[in-house]
C-alpha cells in the first residue's frame, strides 16, 4: 500500500511528544512492507524533506498553517499517489473526510477538550481548537478510529464517536534501550516528560515539600523538553529547593539512566491518552504514581505497579510518594510487577495490530477490535 500520514509534528520536532513517537514507531514498521509518507508541520531550522527509518517526510506550514497546507498538498499533489490516509488528530483534526475520498484511519490518543485547549493556548486559538474538536463525531462519523487505551475509547464513545468503529492499539516501549539498573543510593523521585501546563508538574514540586519533611534525604529530579520558567519560580519559592533538580531536555540514554535510578516515577498530569512514560519507567523497574485520570488509570495497575490518587489532591500525592519511598518491601513488589507489566507492550505487536486495522479498511471491512 501507499500510505499517506498527516500529523502536526514529526519525531524530530522540538516539541514532539508521545503522539509523534507512537506514529513514528508504527510507521517505521509499516515502511518495511509499504510506501509511507508523512506530511507534517515545519519548524525553525528543519529540512523541507527528509527520510527517517524508511518514512519519507515532508514538512510544511508550521504549527497552525500545517492543516491548510496539508489539504492543499493533498489536492494538488498527493491524492494520486496514495492508497490510504492516516489522519493523526492532536486536538485539532485535519478534516480529511472533507477533501479525500481515499480509505482513511484516524488516530485519537485522547480528547483535548477544555482541560488542554484553555491551558495551553491563547483564548482565541483555544476557542477555535475546542470548536474544531467538537466537530469530530460529525465529520469523522464514518471513519475508523484508532485509540490507545480503554479510557480514551470510553471517552470517545461518550463524545459521540461510533464505538463500533474504534480500535484500541496500545502504546509500547523500546525494551532494547530500557531495563533494570542500579537504583540511586538515596531516595530519588523523578518526572521525565514534556513540560506542558496540563502536565501540572508544579503539583509534584509542591507535594515534594511534604515528602522532604517525611523523608529528609529524598531528592526530586525533573527532566524533559519545554519551558521551565514557571517551574523555576516554583522551585525558588519552595523550602525544599536545594533537593530539586530541573535537568531540562535529556537524551534517550540519559532518560533511561534517570528512570533506572529513580525509586518512584510521578505523573501529576490532568489527563493522558495512555501514559507511555509510565510504561518506560516500569520497564526500568520503577513503580509510578499518578492522578486517577483517563489514560493513567489504564497504564498504572493501582496497588500492583504503582498508585493512583485523587486528581489535584497534593496531600494524597505526597503521602503516596512517602509510602513508596519508605516501604522497601512494597517498593520491591511493585518494581517486579512493573517490569512484568511493561513486557506486555512492545512496538512490533502494536504495529501488527495497527496493520490489521489498515488492511480491514483497505479491503472495505471495518469492525471493532479491542
Image (spheres, rainbow, N blue to C red):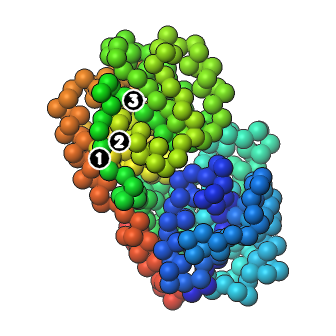
At horizontal 44% and vertical 26% (from top left) the residue drawn is 220
Around disc 2, counting alpha carbons within 10 Å, would you say few (fewer than 14), some (14 to 19), or many (20 or more)?
Answer: many
Q: Is residue 233 above or below residue 248?
A: above
Q: Is residue 119 left or right of residue 64?
A: left
Q: Is residue 136 above or below residue 82?
A: above
User: Callout 1: helix, strand or loop?
Assistant: loop
Whether tag 3 and tag 1 are in contact, CB under 8 A, the answer is no
Q: Earlier in the sequence, mark 3 or mark 1?
A: 1
Query: CA gap, disc 3 to disc 1?
Result: 16 Å
Q: Position of residue 128 (x, y in %)?
A: 76, 50
At horizontal 40% and vertical 42% (from top left) the residue drawn is 257
Q: Nearer the viewer, residue 351 or 169?
A: 351
Kindly tell me whether residue 223 is visible in this rendering: yes
Q: Which mark is residue 74?
A: none
Would you name the residue on which mark 2 appears?
Answer: 260
Q: Is residue 16 left or right of residue 325?
A: right
Query: CA gap, disc 3 to disc 2?
Result: 11 Å
Query: CA gap, disc 1 to disc 2?
Result: 6 Å
Q: Position of residue 101 (x, y in %)?
A: 69, 83
- Where, quadrant-wise, is the N terminus in this rendering? bottom right
Q: Position of residue 274 (x, y in %)?
A: 45, 51
Whether tag 1 and tag 2 are in contact, CB under 8 A, the answer is yes
Would you name the residue on which mark 1 appears?
Answer: 180
User: Callout 3: helix, strand or loop?
Assistant: strand
User: Callout 2: helix, strand or loop?
Assistant: helix
Q: Which mark is residue 189?
A: 3
Q: Is residue 364 above or below residue 63?
A: below
Viewer-nearest of discs 3 and 1: 1
Furthest residue in direction left, as rendered = 329
Q: Nearer the viewer, residue 149 or 196?
A: 196
Q: Is residue 74 left or right of residue 185?
A: right
Amino acid at each position: 500500500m501507499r500510505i499517506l500520514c498527516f500529523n502536526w509534528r514529526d519525531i524530530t520536532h522540538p516539541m514532539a511528544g508521545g503522539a509523534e513517537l507512537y506514529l513514528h514507531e508504527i510507521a517505521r514498521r509499516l515502511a518495511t512492507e509499504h510506501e509511507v509518507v508523512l506530511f507534517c508541520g515545519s519548524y525553525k531550522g528543519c529540512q523541507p524533506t527528509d527520510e527517517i527509518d524508511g518514512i519519507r517526510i515532508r514538512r510544511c506550514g508550521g504549527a497552525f498553517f500545517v492543516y491548510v497546507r496539508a489539504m492543499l498538498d493533498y489536492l494538488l499533489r498527493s491524492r494520486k499517489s496514495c492508497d490510504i490516509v492516516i489522519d493523526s488528530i492532536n486536538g485539532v483534526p485535519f478534516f480529511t473526510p472533507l477533501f479525500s475520498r481515499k480509505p482513511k484511519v484516524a488516530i485519537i490518543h485522547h480528547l483535548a477538550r477544555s482541560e488542554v485547549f484553555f491551558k495551553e493556548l491563547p483564548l482565541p486559538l483555544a476557542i477555535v481548537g475546542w470548536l474544531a474538536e467538537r466537530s469530530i463525531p460529525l465529520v469523522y462519523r464514518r471513519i475508523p478510529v484508532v485509540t490507545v487505551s480503554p479510557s480514551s475509547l470510553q471517552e470517545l464513545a461518550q463524545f459521540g464517536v461510533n464505538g463500533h468503529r474504534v480500535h484500541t492499539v496500545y502504546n509500547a516501549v523500546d525494551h532494547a534501550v530500557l531495563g533494570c539498573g542500579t537504583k540511586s543510593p538515596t531516595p530519588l523521585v523523578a518526572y521525565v516528560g514534556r513540560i506542558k501546563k496540563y502536565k501540572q508538574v508544579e503539583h509534584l514540586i509542591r507535594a515534594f515539600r511534604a515528602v522532604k519533611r517525611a523523608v529528609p534525604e529524598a531528592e526530586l529530579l525533573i527532566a524533559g523538553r519545554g519551558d521551565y520558567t514557571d517551574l523555576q519560580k516554583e522551585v525558588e519559592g519552595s523550602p525544599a529547593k536545594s533537593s530539586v533538580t530541573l535537568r531540562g531536555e535529556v537524551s534517550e540514554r540519559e532518560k533511561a539512566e534517570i528512570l533506572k535510578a529513580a525509586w518512584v516515577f510521578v505523573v501529576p498530569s490532568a489527563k493522558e491518552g495512555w501514559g507511555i512514560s509510565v510504561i518506560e519507567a516500569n520497564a526500568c523497574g520503577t513503580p509510578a504514581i499518578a492522578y486517577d485520570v483517563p489514560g493513567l488509570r489504564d497504564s498504572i495497575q493501582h496497588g500492583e505497579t504503582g498508585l493512583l490518587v485523587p486528581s489535584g489532591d497534593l496531600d494524597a500525592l505526597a503521602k503516596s510518594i512517602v509510602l513508596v519511598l519508605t516501604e522497601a518491601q512494597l517498593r520491591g513488589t511493585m518494581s517486579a510487577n512493573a517490569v512484568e507489566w511493561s513486557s506486555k507492550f512492545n512496538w512490533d505487536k502494536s504495529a501488527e495490530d495497527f496493520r490489521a486495522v489498515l488492511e480491514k479498511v483497505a479491503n472495505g471491512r471495518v469492525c471493532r477490535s479491542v
